[in-house]
Image (cartoon, grey):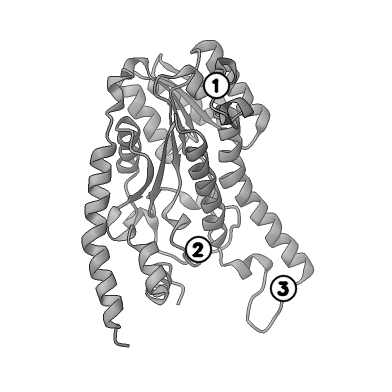
C-alpha cells in the first residue's frame, strides 16, 4: 500500500523536529544535582533491590559512598547485597505493595538518617500472556466461562498490585498528598511531604516501561498496569513541583523477566537475554538522570522507540505490525 504524501511529510517533520526538541530540553534540564547534595551525603532508597536494575543501582550508589537503603521481599538476597554494598547500606525485607511495610521503612529512615533525598522505584511484576489466554480459552470456537473470566480478573489484580498499588503506596508513604494549606500555597513545615521536608533536592525515579506508551501483544496486563502508575506519577509531578520526578521507559531489559510473571504459561517472544538492554546500562541511565535532574519521560533507547507513540497516532497499523513481529504474534 502506497504511503500518502501527507503521512510521509508528517514522518519527515517528526524525524527532524523531535530529536532537536528532545536534545535541547535535556540540555536545558540539567541542573547537576551533586552540586547541592554531595554523593557521600545522599540518602537513597531503592525499592526492588534484590535483582535486576534495582540491584545494580544499589551497588552503583554504594560504590560512590552514598547512604543506601535496599528494600525487597527476598531477605536472603538482600542480606548478600547489603554485604556487598558495605557499611553505608541498610536493608529491610518488605513488600512495597504493603502499607505497613512501607511505613516501617519510612520510620526507620527518619530514625537513622533523618530523611530521604532520592527514591528509586524499581520493583514490579510482569505479565506475558494474551488476554483471552488468561481465561483458559483455547480457540476462537469457544467462549470464556464464568470461572475463566474470574481467573483472568484475579490475575489482573495481581498485576495491578505489583505495578500500580506498589508505586501508589510508595508515593503515599514518601510523598503524600498535598494538604489544603499546600494547595493554597501557605506551606506549614510540619505538613510538607517527607521528601521536600527532609531534602535540599528531593528526587523520585519510577522505573517504568516503553510498554506504557506503545502497546504490544501478550503485554496487555503489563502495559495497562504500568501505564496507570506512569500517569499517576506524572500527575504527582504536577502536584509536587518541588520534587524532581523522572520516568524511565526502557524497552526489553535482559534478565529473568519471566520469573515475576503473574500469569504463567508458555512464552512465545524471543529470549530477552539475547537482545534486551543491559542491566548496567539502564541502571547508569537511571542514576545519571536523577543526578542531572532530568524530569519527565526518558525512553531507552530514544531512537526509534520515542517515535512509536507519535507514529501510532498517524499510522497505527505500522506499529501494530512491528509489535506482532517482535513478539512472534502473527
160 versus 130 height, above or below: above
Disc 1 target residue: 187
- In which quadrant of the rendered view does residue 87 lie? top left
147 versus 231 height, above or below: below
Residue 250 position within the rendered picture, expressed as x and y whole percent measured from the top left: 38, 50
Pick the front one: 149 or 261: 149
Disc 2 target residue: 267
Spatial CA distance of label 3 from label 2 is 21 Å
Q: Residue furthest bottom?
A: 1
Kind of element beneath mark 3: loop
Disc nearer the start of the sequence (2/1): 1
Identify the residue at horizontal 30%, vertical 76% (top origin).
7
Identify the residue at horizontal 25%, vertical 39% (top origin).
28
Disc 3 target residue: 144
Residue 295 shows in the view: yes
Q: Residue furthest right?
A: 146
Amino acid at each position: 500500500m502506497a504511503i500518502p504524501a501527507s503521512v510521509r511529510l508528517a514522518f519527515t517533520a517528526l524525524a527532524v523536529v523531535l530529536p532537536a526538541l528532545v536534545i535541547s530540553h535535556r540540555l536545558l534540564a540539567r541542573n547537576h544535582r551533586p552540586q547541592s547534595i554531595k554523593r557521600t551525603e545522599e540518602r537513597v532508597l531503592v525499592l526492588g533491590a534484590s535483582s535486576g536494575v534495582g540491584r545494580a543501582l544499589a551497588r552503583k550508589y554504594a560504590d560512590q559512598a552514598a547512604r543506601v537503603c535496599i528494600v525487597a521481599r527476598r531477605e536472603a538476597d538482600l542480606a548478600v547485597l547489603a554485604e556487598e554494598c558495605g557499611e553505608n547500606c541498610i536493608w529491610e525485607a518488605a513488600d512495597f505493595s504493603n502499607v505497613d511495610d512501607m511505613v516501617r521503612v519510612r520510620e526507620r529512615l527518619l530514625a537513622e538518617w533523618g530523611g530521604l533525598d532520592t527514591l528509586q522505584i524499581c520493583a514490579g511484576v510482569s505479565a506475558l500472556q494474551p488476554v483471552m489466554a488468561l481465561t483458559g480459552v483455547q480457540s476462537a470456537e469457544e467462549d470464556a466461562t464464568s470461572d475463566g473470566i474470574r481467573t483472568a480478573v484475579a490475575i489482573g489484580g495481581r498485576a495491578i498490585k505489583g505495578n500500580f498499588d506498589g508505586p501508589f503506596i510508595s508515593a503515599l508513604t514518601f510523598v503524600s498528598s498535598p494538604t489544603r494549606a499546600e494547595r493554597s500555597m501557605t506551606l506549614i513545615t510540619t505538613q510538607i511531604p517527607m521528601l521536600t521536608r527532609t531534602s535540599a533536592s528531593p528526587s523520585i525515579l519510577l522505573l517504568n516501561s516503553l510498554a506504557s506508551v506503545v502497546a504490544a501483544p501478550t503485554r496487555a496486563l503489563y502495559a495497562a498496569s504500568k501505564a496507570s502508575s506512569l500517569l499517576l506519577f506524572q500527575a504527582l509531578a504536577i502536584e509536587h513541583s518541588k520534587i524532581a520526578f523522572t520516568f524511565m521507559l526502557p524497552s526489553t531489559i535482559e534478565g529473568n523477566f519471566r520469573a515475576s510473571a503473574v500469569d504463567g504459561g508458555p512464552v512465545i517472544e524471543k529470549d530477552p537475554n539475547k537482545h534486551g538492554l543491559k542491566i548496567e546500562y539502564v541502571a547508569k541511565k537511571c542514576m545519571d538522570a536523577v543526578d542531572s535532574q532530568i524530569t519527565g519521560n526518558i525512553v531507552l533507547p530514544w531512537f526509534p522507540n520515542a517515535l512509536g507513540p507519535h507514529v501510532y497516532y498517524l499510522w497505527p497499523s505500522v506499529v501494530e505490525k512491528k509489535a506482532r513481529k517482535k513478539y512472534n504474534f502473527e
